[in-house]
Image (cartoon, helix red, strand yellow):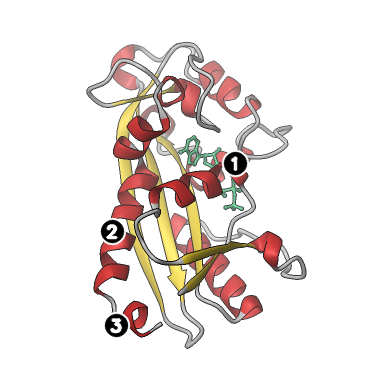
C-alpha cells in the first residue's frame, strides 16, 4: 500500500519514516507530486488542520495521504503556542526556526518551575480516496527548561524536557525521543490500525 506524507517539514518526514519501518507500506512524499498546491492551515484545532491537509493531498494524488499537525501547549500561556507553534515568533521562517523557542523562553522568563508545565500534541490524519479518514492522537507531557540544550531533533526540542527525565528531547537519541514523543505515540496507534485494517490487507 502506498501512503503519501502530506507534510513539507523534512524533520517530521524523517521521524515518521523511521518509526513506521516495520510495516510493508511504501511512503511517498509531496516531492513525488510537485504539482500539489500548498494547503492553507486555517483551522483552530490540530485535528482540523491535520484532516484538511490529509484530505486535500489525497484528493490531489489519488492515494491515501497521511498528515501530521502538531505543536506545543504551555500551561502558563493558556495552551499557546498550540496550533500556531510553527509561527510563534512573528519573524520565524518556519517551524524549525530557533526564534520560536527563543520567544518562548523570553515569555516564560519570570515563570517559576511549577508553572513551566507543557505538552507536545500530535494529531495524525489518514485520508482515503473514497472520502473516509481516521485520526490518531499522541501526547508527550513535560516542562520547558530555562535555556536551550542539545543539537538533535527539531523545533522546540532544545527547550522541552519530557516528564520523568532530565535531558531535553534535543539531547536524546532518535530512539529515546521516539519512545516518549507525541509523534511516536500517535504512530503506534496508526500502526495498530493499519495492521488490523481490511483496507490495508486488501492493498
Ligand atoms: P507541515 O504543516 O508541512 O506538516 P509544519 O512544520 O508547518 O509542517 P505544523 O503546522 O504541524 O507543521 O507545526 C508544528 C510545529 O510544532 C513544528 O513546526 C514545530 O515548531 C513544533 N513541533 C511539532 N512537533 C515537534 C517535535 O517533535 N519537536 C519539536 N517541535 C515540534
Work out whether mark 3 precedes mark 1 in sequence or the reverse, and give the earlier one.
1
Q: Which residue is at a point 33% across and 62% down the rendered structure image?
A: 190
What whole-number distance in Å separates the C-alpha atoms at marks 3 and 1? 35 Å
Residue 189's disc number? 2
Quarter of the image where the N terminus is located: bottom left
Q: Position of residue 129 (x, y in %)?
A: 51, 84
Give the vertical position of 46 relative to 9 (above or below).
below
Is disc 2 surrounded by few (<14), some (14 to 19) or many (20+) residues within 10 Å?
A: some
Tag 2, which secondary structure?
Answer: helix
* Disc 2 from disc 1: Cα separation: 24 Å
Query: Looking at mark 3, is its residue's CB closer than 8 Å to ligand 1?
Result: no
Query: Which of the 4 image quarters holds residue 33?
Result: bottom right
Ligand 1 neighbours mark 1 (CB distance < 8 Å): yes
Instruction: Decide which of tag 3 and tag 2 comes sooner along the chain.
Output: 2
Q: Please name the residue that numbered disc 1 is placed on.
A: 86
Callout 3 crowding tier (Cα within 10 Å): few <14, some 14–19, many ≥20: few
- Percent coordinates x, y for residue 128 in the rendering: 47, 79
In this view, the mark in front (3 or 1) = 3
> Which residue is under mark 3?
198
Q: Nearer the viewer, residue 1 or 43?
A: 1
Q: Secondary structure at mark 3?
A: helix
Queried on whether the Cβ of the residue with tag 2 lies below 8 angstroms from ligand 1, the answer reads no
Amino acid at each position: 500500500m502506498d501512503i503519501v506524507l502530506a507534510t513539507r517539514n523534512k524533520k517530521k518526514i524523517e521521524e515518521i519514516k523511521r518509526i513506521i519501518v516495520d510495516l510493508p507500506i511504501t511512503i511517498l512524499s509531496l516531492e513525488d507530486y510537485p504539482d500539489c498546491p500548498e494547503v492553507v492551515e486555517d483551522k483552530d484545532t490540530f485535528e482540523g488542520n491535520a484532516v484538511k491537509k490529509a484530505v486535500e493531498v489525497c484528493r490531489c494524488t489519488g492515494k491515501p495521504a497521511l498528515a501530521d499537525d502538531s505543536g506545543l501547549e504551555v500551561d502558563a500561556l493558556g495552551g499557546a503556542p498550540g496550533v500556531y507553534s510553527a509561527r510563534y515568533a512573528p519573524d520565524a521562517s518556519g517551524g524549525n526556526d530557533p526564534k520560536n523557542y527563543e520567544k518562548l523562553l523570553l515569555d516564560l522568563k519570570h515563570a517559576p518551575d511549577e508553572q513551566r508545565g507543557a505538552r507536545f500534541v500530535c494529531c495524525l490524519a489518514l485520508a482515503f480516496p473514497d472520502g473516509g479518514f481516521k485520526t490518531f492522537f499522541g501526547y508527550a507531557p513535560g516542562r520547558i527548561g530555562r535555556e536551550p540544550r542539545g543539537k538533535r531533533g527539531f523545533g522546540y526540542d532544545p527547550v522541552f524536557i519530557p516528564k520523568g527525565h532530565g535531558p531535553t528531547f534535543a539531547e536524546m537519541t532518535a530512539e529515546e525521543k521516539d519512545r516518549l514523543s507525541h509523534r511516536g505515540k500517535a504512530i503506534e496507534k496508526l500502526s495498530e490500525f493499519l495492521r488490523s485494517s481490511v483496507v490495508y490487507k486488501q492493498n
